[in-house]
Amino acid sequence: MNIPVLAMSFFMLIFPAPEKTNPRGKDLFNNRKFITASWLGYLQSREEKRVISNIPMVLYNAPEEGITKIICIPKFPKEWNAKFKGKTKAEKVAITKTLAIGILNHALGEETFNIYALLQASNTKKKNTGEFPSIVKIYVNAGNAWNEIGEKKIRNGAEWKKLQCDLAFTSIYKKKRI
């Protein structure tokens, strides 16, 4: 056996490679006590008259960090929506719970969705986050890591909705709109 390879293998066992660090400092899904809601929602573009429905969304509200809305854009919306045709409200609730658990446990992810997190930082001058104007940091999920892809000043609710639609339609149709 090659001694340098054996020595390197032994070294790697004693000193494992450091875990990839997250620019935000942790996995957003890690502390479940901050998850305040999950639902299947929709995004609608007024400009293009398009709608994407049955989008899994999660609200993560960590007091020191702010409110983060996690949006899971299906990579193949037509096929995705076909799964929900004819389902009752109770069935959709059960599916939503299963989806949220799958997404939070990283069982569902990159192969099914483009997952974005929109972090609206806490502001000590305001009583609550979720108020405008504010700076929103945009992250994309890659496994357990969140990579910051941008930041945008949002002045009102209409701009907040537009940002979400732009992310969704950009990820589906691969057009730069943000």
Image: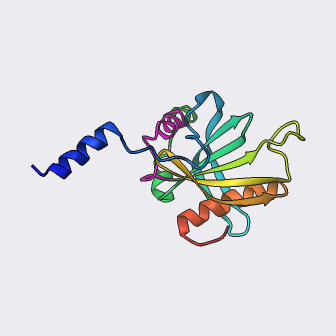
Verify whether residue 98 appears in magenta: yes
Query: Count the marks: how many?
Result: 0
Query: Image point 67% across, 45% down: which residue?
Result: 69
Q: What's the residue at 68%, 56% (across, down)?
A: 164
User: Farthest left residue?
Assistant: 1
- Looking at the rendering, the stretch of residues picked out in magenta corresponds to 95-113
Q: Seen from this angle, which residue lies furthest right?
A: 125
Q: Residue furthest bottom?
A: 175
Position of residue 125 in the picture relative to residue 108 (left or right): right
- Which of the two residues, 63 or 44, is positioned nearer the viewer here? 63
Residue furthest toward the top?
33
Q: In this view, does 13 lie above or below 52?
A: above
Residue 177, horizontal then vertical, whole percent: 66, 70
Quarter of the image that includes the C terminus:
bottom right
Q: Which residue is drawn at 68% across and 69% down?
A: 48
Residue 36: x %, y % from top left: 67, 32
Residue 134 appears at what percent x and percent y? 82, 52
